[in-house]
């Protein structure tokens, strides 16, 4: 299978760094006292939907790569 | 048998020879007569003796030339054989070179055709002809980049919420 290592390596590097930022943000949030104002329910719902969509897209891409 | 009348050194002679050889005999007698008449003075017998000696000398000299020429003839024959051999080898080499040239021409022609086909294909791609199919690797790379965009946006959101 042809692989453009430059493009794919760059994308994977960006994904890894973004995930690290998310992990750090979640850890910071867990270690901090609960804020006086929580995020609006609509925002949280949209965030969850986006996370699920991105995970789904990644799954689809991985499956496609595995099947050629 | 034929009868031939000869005249040598002023004296007539009647001789016999095989039928058909009369003219040759007359020519030979003319040679002897010429030699004998070229010798002045002396008796007829002396003139004939000197004519015979001169003719014998010429015959001896001619025999020597023939013997001397034989080795040269052998060398000449060998040289001719060598030249013929070289000519044959050169002809074979020429045929082989012509065959190689034909083969090279054929290969060059085929290469030119392949190059022309490749150029035409490239030109078609340049002009935006519909690609037969996008490379899977290219599609995956683009999808990965889009996912990276989306996860980076999520990271920004997470950091804002933290």
Image (cartoon, coloured by chain):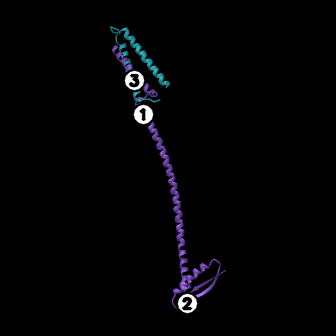
Chain colours: A cyan, B purple
Q: Earlier in the sequence, mark 3 or mark 1?
A: 1
B147 relative to B81 in the view: left or right: left
Q: Please tell me which residue is depicted at 35% across the width and 17% down the height of the picture.
A: B156
Q: Which mark is residue B46?
A: 2
Q: Please tell me which residue is depicted at 61% across the width and 86% down the height of the picture.
A: B13
- Of residue A68 and residue A37, the one placed in the foreground of this image is A68
Q: Earlier in the sequence, mark 1 or mark 2?
A: 2
The residue labelled by disc 3 is: B145
The residue labelled by disc 1 is: B122
- Of residue A33 and residue A67, the one placed in the foreground of this image is A67
Q: Where is residue B142 shown, x and y percent of the image?
A: 41, 24
Determine the secondary structure under disc 1. Answer: helix
Quarter of the image holding residue B149?
top left
The answer to whether any part of residue B53 appears in the image is: no
Please tell me whether residue B128 is drawn above or below residue A22 in the rendered image.
below
User: Quadrant where the N terminus of chain B lies?
Assistant: bottom right
Q: Give the letter of the chain under mark 3.
A: B
Q: Give the letter of the chain under mark 2.
A: B
- Of residue B153 and residue A32, the one placed in the foreground of this image is B153
A52 relative to B33 in the view: left or right: left
């Amino acid at each position: 299978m042809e692989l453009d290592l430059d493009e794919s390596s760059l994308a994977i590097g960006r994904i890894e760094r973004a995930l690290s930022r998310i992990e750090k943000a979640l850890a910071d949030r867990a270690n901090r006292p609960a804020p006086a104002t929580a995020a609006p329910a609509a925002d949280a719902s949209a965030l969850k939907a986006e996370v699920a969509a991105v995970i789904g897209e990644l799954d689809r891409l991985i499956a496609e790569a595995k099947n050629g | 048998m034929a009868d031939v009348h000869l005249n040598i050194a002023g004296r007539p002679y009647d001789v016999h020879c095989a039928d058909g050889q009369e003219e040759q005999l007359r020519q030979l007698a003319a040679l002897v007569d010429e030699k004998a008449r070229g010798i002045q003075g002396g008796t007829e017998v002396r003139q004939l003796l000197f004519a015979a000696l001169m003719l014998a000398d010429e015959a001896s000299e001619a025999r020597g030339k023939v013997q001397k020429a034989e080795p040269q003839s052998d060398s000449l024959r060998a040289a001719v054989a060598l030249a013929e051999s070289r000519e044959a080898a050169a002809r074979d080499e020429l045929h082989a070179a012509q065959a190689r040239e034909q083969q090279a021409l054929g290969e060059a022609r085929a290469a030119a055709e392949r190059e022309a086909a490749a150029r035409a294909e490239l030109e078609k791609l340049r002009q935006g002809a519909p690609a037969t199919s996008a490379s899977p690797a290219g599609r995956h790379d683009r999808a990965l980049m889009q996912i990276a965009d989306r996860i980076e946006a999520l990271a920004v959101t997470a950091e804002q919420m933290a």
